[in-house]
Amino acid sequence: MIERTTAQKKAKELSKFLREENPDYDYLKNVFKYLRKELEIEVVSKNKKLPYVPTEDELKKFYDIIWASDKHQDVIILKTFLYTGIRVSELINVKLTDVDFRNCQIRISEGKGNKDRMVPFPDTFREILSMHCKLNTSNDIKYKRTYLFESSWKKKYTDRGIRKILAKYSKEAGFERNISPHKLRHFLFTWLKRNGIDDALIQPYSGHESRKSLEIYSKLSITDAQNEYNSVIKNFPI
């Protein structure tokens, strides 16, 4: 059996021929596309593992642990994740002015892909979220909050800070795996699908993109999606 040249060494050899072409990413992508064709190499797609999604019992236990901590902001953080399905990078940047209590929606500015969108929350969450927005997290009566969630240091939370909070409660609950923000996102969308909500209605506020369904998604509005959301969210386990 002929011993192969290492990939790194072969790349250096090929670079001598390609450098004079002043290649960019798209050019190299097409070169190797046609190279695979010349060598009759098939693209092998790996089966993606299904993401871990917490069970309803695990979620209820997790919620009870946070509720017992008597840290109300942590409870509201959890519920915001669960009801909206937003990413942690989006949650930490939500400002008080982004919350629309009249329509029960939160504006996500420059989410993944630098796109803006609206996400719904249930009418039953409006009162407690409104009370949270009016609370001052600082003892300084002159201090005015900017962000929906801020620490006692008068600063918005970091991605790492939110993950640490959830990891702490996961440990207290005795879970082998941490309940991460993305697992909460998976739980909501999985739960909505199990309750009959179609992907086409979830997509307008989930922040997902789908080329295959782009045409139908573009015809749907947040109002259509929220009507379906409201019809089932009243039965949400938390």
Image (cartoon, rainbow, N blue to C red):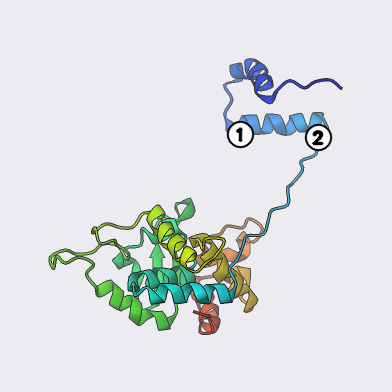
Which residue: 70% across, 23% down? Answer: 6
Which residue: 24% across, 58% down? Answer: 153
Point out residue 186 in the picture as x, y percentages from the top left corner. Answer: 57, 65
Of callouts 2 and 1, the N-terminal one: 1
Question: Image quadrant of residue 105?
Answer: bottom left
Question: Image quadrant of residue 176?
Answer: bottom right
Mark 2 or mark 1, which is nearer to you?
2
Point out residue 25 in the picture as x, y percentages from the top left corner. Answer: 58, 32
Query: Can residue 219 be seen at all in this image of the molecule?
Result: no
Give the secondary structure at mark 2: loop
Q: Which residue is mark 1?
A: 26
Q: Amino acid at mark 1?
A: Asp
Which residue: 73% across, 52% down? Answer: 47
Point out residue 115 in the picture as x, y percentages from the top left corner. Answer: 45, 56
Give the secondary structure at mark 1: helix
Q: Is residue 155 above or below residue 216?
A: above
Q: Which residue is mark 2?
A: 41
Determine crowd level at label 1: few under 14, some 14-19, many 20+ residues with C-alpha closer than 10 A: few
- Near-viewer residue (156 or 63): 63
